[in-house]
Amino acid sequence: MTPKSSPQAANPASQVIDRHIRELGGWRGAALQRMRELIHEADPGVVEELKWSKPSNPMGVPVWSHDGIICTGETYKQAVKLTFFYGASLNDPARLFNSSLDGNTRRAIDIHENDAIQESAFKELFRAAVALNIAKRKKK
């Protein structure tokens, strides 16, 4: 969960994400929670949101933003998927991206049960995505 001292603690979207992680439980809940913690460690100013609510997914999709969307966090039966909106523009020396590799814009990281997370590499990748968003915003 996000720390109580964090501005996210009072964010309604963050509260829904907290509940979603609790309801998921198991390895998927633990994986999504750990990735969320790493996201907040990488960028304490990140904003949590929920987008794209629909009847088949009334909660919507967890989204992390900083000067625009950085990534989404979706859960499937066999994977937790973190999709970076501008992942194709990011340097990925640790080769974390392992899904959605054919697109011109997005890239994703699929985490499966028992996968080890390269935590420091993930935080660097997230910071690079934030820097890219900030640079894009400054150009406008």
Image (cartoon, rainbow, N blue to C red):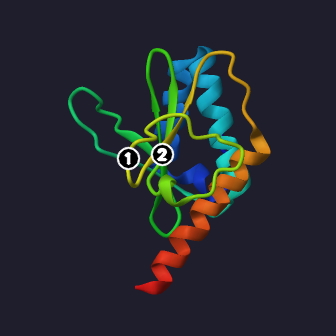
Does 41 sit left or right of 66 as displayed?
A: right
Helix, strand or loop for disc 1? loop
Is residue 128 in view? yes
Looking at the picture, how far across and down is residue 15, in whole percent?
51, 41
Residue at 61% x, 69% y: name it.
131
Q: Residues within 10 Å of mark 1 (few under 14, many from 20)?
A: few
Three-letter amino acid code at disc 2?
Arg
Answer left or right for 101 relative to 90.
left
Q: Which residue is mark 2?
A: 107
Is residue 95 positioned above or below 65 on the image? above
The spot of residue 5 in percent (x, y) is 72, 54
Please name the residue that numbered disc 1 is placed on: 103
Secondary structure at numbered mark 2:
strand
Q: Residue at x 59, y 53 (%)?
A: 8
| Mark 2 in CB contact with mark 1 (< 8 angstroms) | yes
Residue at the location (68% across, 22% down)?
115
Rendering coords of residue 93 (x, y %): 70, 50
